[in-house]
Image (cartoon, rainbow, N blue to C red):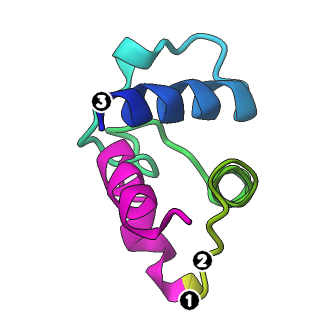
Amino acid sequence: MEDLIKKLKLELIEALNLEEVTPEDIDNQAPLFSDEGLGLDSIDALEITLILERNYGIRIENPNQGKEIFYSIQTLADYITTHQK
């Protein structure tokens, strides 16, 4: 799980062009979409969706689940672990 979390952090940093952020800066439990976390927005959510589809073969069937799935690095990793093909 730790390897997946580190990989996810690197993928987010690259895909979202978070040039000033290192994997160590991202708290596994911190909200991704609030000011106390990374402060991501809806465009970033689309990028994360693409990462899940391209890199993990996961398509989110119910868009209403996105808020729960994308809450933090930990919730993303948990979702990938249980849904990866």
Find out whether the residues at labels 2 and 1 contact each other: C-beta distance under 8 Å. yes
Tell which tag, 3 or 1, sits nearer the viewer: 3
Direction from residue 41 to residue 70 in the image, left or right: left
- Compare residues 38 and 49 and report the one nearer the observer: 49
Residue 69 position within the rendered picture, expressed as x and y whole percent measured from the top left: 42, 66
Find out whether the residues at labels 3 and 2 contact each other: C-beta distance under 8 Å. no
Q: Residue at x 39, y 34 (%)?
A: 5
Residue 56 position by quadrant: bottom right
User: What residue did someone put label 3 on?
Assistant: 2
Quadrant in the picture for the C terminus:
bottom right
Residue type highlighted by circle 3: Glu
Tally of numbered discs:
3
Magenta portion: prevailing SS class: helix
Q: Residue furthest front?
A: 85
Quadrant in the picture for the N terminus:
top left
**Residue 39 counted in the magenta span:** no
Residue 81 position within the rendered picture, expressed as x and y whole percent measured from the top left: 38, 57
Sequence-first disc among 3 and 1: 3
Sequence-first disc among 3 and 2: 3
Element on which disc 2 rests: loop
Direction from residue 55 to residue 62 in the image, left or right: left
Q: Residue at x 48, y 12 (%)?
A: 22
User: What residue did someone put label 1 on?
Assistant: 62
Identify whether 68 is placed above or below 64: above
Residue type highlighted by circle 1: Asn
User: What residue did someone put label 2 on?
Assistant: 60
State which region is magenta. Answer: 64-85
Mark 3 → mark 2, Cα distance in angstroms: 23 Å
Mark 2 → mark 1, Cα distance in angstroms: 6 Å
Q: Residue at x 38, y 27 (%)?
A: 3
